[in-house]
Amino acid sequence: MDDFVRTKLVEWGLSEWVEKFKDEQIDAESLYDLDDREIDNLITKAGPRVKFKKNLKLLKCEQEHEEAADVVQVLPSTSDTGKRKSDLQSNPSRLQSPAKRQRLSMPGFEESIILSDVKSIMTFVHERLNDQDKLSAFLKKKISDLEIEKRELVGVFGKTGAGKSSLINAIIKEKNLLPSGSINACTSVMIKVEANRDSLKYEAEIEFITKEEWKEELWSFRQFLDNNKNQKKEDDDYHDAVEKLSALYGEDWTRSFENLMDRKYFKEIPEFLQSRRKILTCESANELSAKCVKYTRSESKQGEGNEGKTWFWPLVKCVTVRVPNNPFLQHVTLVDLPGNGDCNKSRDQMWKGIVGDCSTVWIVTEINRAASDKAAWGILESVSSLIGNGGECQQIHFICTKSDLVDDSDDLSSADIHDQIIKRNIQAKDGVRKEFNKRSKINKHFTDDSFKVFTVSSKEFLKGKHLSPEETEITKLQGFLQDLNDCHSETVNYVNGAYGILSLIEGARRRKEGVGKADDVCKVLEKNMTEQLDQVKKAVEKAIKDFEQCLTEGVKNSKTSEEKLKSFLDRDKQPSFFKTLEAVVRKDGMHKTKKGEHINLNTVLASCLTDSIDEKFRKTFPNDVKGGSFNGVISRFSLDPNSLIQKYQDVKLQLIFLQTEEDKIKAKLNKIILKEKKIIYNSLTETIEKNMKKCYEDARKISGKDALKKMRKTIETHVSLNRNIYEDAKKTMLEKMDILMTIICKELKETLDHSIKLSLKASALSENLPDVSKHLETVQQHYNEGKCSQEGEVTSQYPGKYLNVISCHRIIIINRFLLNYFNSFYELSKKWGTI
């Protein structure tokens, strides 16, 4: 047995079978060749056996796709046709297998060719359409609506020093992009990292908070410092206030608060006073990193060399860094996120919005105590509801960094160090998974399948002293980003829509008779529409009724929430509790301590309601839209136009259009539902937060003798006298679900009614429409290729290791590429006189 097999078993949650695989001497080579009988003998329990077979199948597919890509990547680009044969011979590394050198990244290679081809066709058709009739105007709008930008957000969390910046730098292969390695410095603002599609420069776009917001913060700092002149310097809020003021103003703020909005303090950033964004443009990542530090990092106490330096991060809301020509960021934005609880409202709202929009979350911590790192697990628990039922996160990646840091003594050989690292990596993964299974607060929102553990070393990835690139697991995270960047789904959606539009144009041009039949088809479709909308409405109403029952039970259990609140308020014996409570009421119930404790009294009070619906909510509104919202009723919705094609051949092309329109509206609805379900879920806590606002305002005014006791009494009395807050939250959520049902039914009916009317009832307008028959043939071919890909992998007729099992549309694209390449090579050879 080798480390590869052991690592895979642990990664798949099958660590208990490691010894069995070891006894049977299963290595990486034999793993791929295991048949069902051998697997049955190895894994005797049904559950783990099914999980193993599923993961092994995915692993094989991944390998086969990579090997197919190797066939293409091993060949020189056709853009090299201007080079002489001797150039290629003198540089044999150009023809080496990618396995022997760093593989060139080509995510979505064939899809990008198809997408470009079809977009060119649709641009041409759009220009040929006039605006003289309703049908042409309708078609032009449909073509314009095909352009949908795909953008995946990956949120990166981790405390100072965990290695977030180094990890991001290593993964996107930009060694010096984000500053790292400073002991006292930490990222203080959100940093988005994405591709620069408009320029070959490195850019940073800096978004500031408003002047009014900074004035409010200055007023808040002044009030706080005036009321706490004898405050201990280690107090969280005192430290935060002093750090921000010192960073921007140096010692000036200690002398007077009166002139801190003077223009002299903002000479370097006139954009702040003008409410504009500042753009930094550089030739290199290193140069941009140096310029960005003062806008992103808290280094005001860095010491030597920083005296008198001004730091602008207290004024910054977000920094977007754009990197040119980066294949990992074409459709992905990485977001380096600081902890929540920012006292600036707009910054806090932006933070919550971005967290809720992340499709994947990375929790970064050092490997030496990953399973027991309270800060890392605290971050994950505090955001679990925001990214789970209240967000759209599909995967959590727990990333253990600095895996190369082991005993590197002279007594150990390189092989011994390698073995130590691998062994600890396996132990760390096992420990983290066990800890995850204990965390009930997280498990309410995420299953074991959505949680993955990585052990990475950015240093080893770059230097390779003891580990191969694959063993650092940086390549796994790069592969994950490539999958997110894969434009296959974008291509399929665009091609499907284009196929429908061209079918409608050609159908309208050809139609000379059959108007009566079109009327018959309309009647059938309208009947189907009524029946299908009724099914949708019933499913949504049932979901609303189920949630109403759950929430009613939650309201009855409100006492449990109040007991949790009381437990928090009973900490009065703790020496620093008064300052903690003071910070909590000052921030409307939310506070994060320097020790990493996340306090939110609003979520505590709402927990009786959220606990009652969490499991059902996750099943009703899965973050993976393929799972089907409202128990799949949206995915099952259909006017069934395909079944009518055989009977009504005269309007076949119009029915094809209606089928693609139906697919498009269902995809749109799933996105709407994903957005709205976040609002619905978060409404429970937000309703309670609004109700508690007056209570916090009253508590903030309390000072002097017995202030702690009075604050506690104020909060407890408010909750006791406002027992209707739970019923109000329940009512608000159900009302929002009703609104969602209305949106769904309206979108389905109006969109499809309009499409039916214009495609089947409009008069023939063939003289006004362009001839798109040839374009339709081309797009139909791409459409069929996409359908073939969606239906699954097929066995290739071609022999050999590389094209063993690969989707049919990829075979076609690769063959086209190879044909073009060999044609170019043939012409080049003739030019050189070699044939």
Image: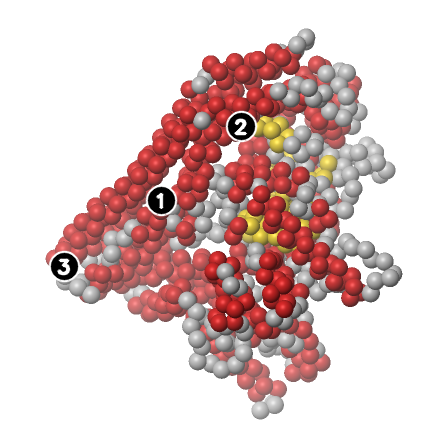
Q: Which structural element holds mark 1?
A: helix
Q: Earlier in the sequence, mark 3 or mark 2?
A: 3
Q: Residues within 10 Å of mark 1 (few under 14, many from 20)?
A: many
Which residue has dot 1 on it?
A: 630
Which residue has dot 2 on it?
A: 604
Dividing the image into 4 quarters, which one contains the N terminus? bottom right
Q: Which structural element holds mark 3?
A: helix
Q: Is residue 522 left or right of residue 467?
A: left
Q: Residue at x 22, y 58 (%)?
A: 765
The label nearer to you, 1 versus 2, is: 2
Q: Could you give the CA–CA distance between mark 3 and mark 2, rounded to whole angstroms?
A: 62 Å
Q: Residues within 10 Å of mark 3 (few under 14, many from 20)?
A: some
Q: Earlier in the sequence, mark 1 or mark 2?
A: 2
Dividing the image into 4 quarters, which one contains the C terminus? bottom right
Q: Can you tell which mark lies on residue 517?
A: 3
Residue closest to the eye, 326 or 62? 62
Q: Position of residue 672 (x, y in %)?
A: 40, 43
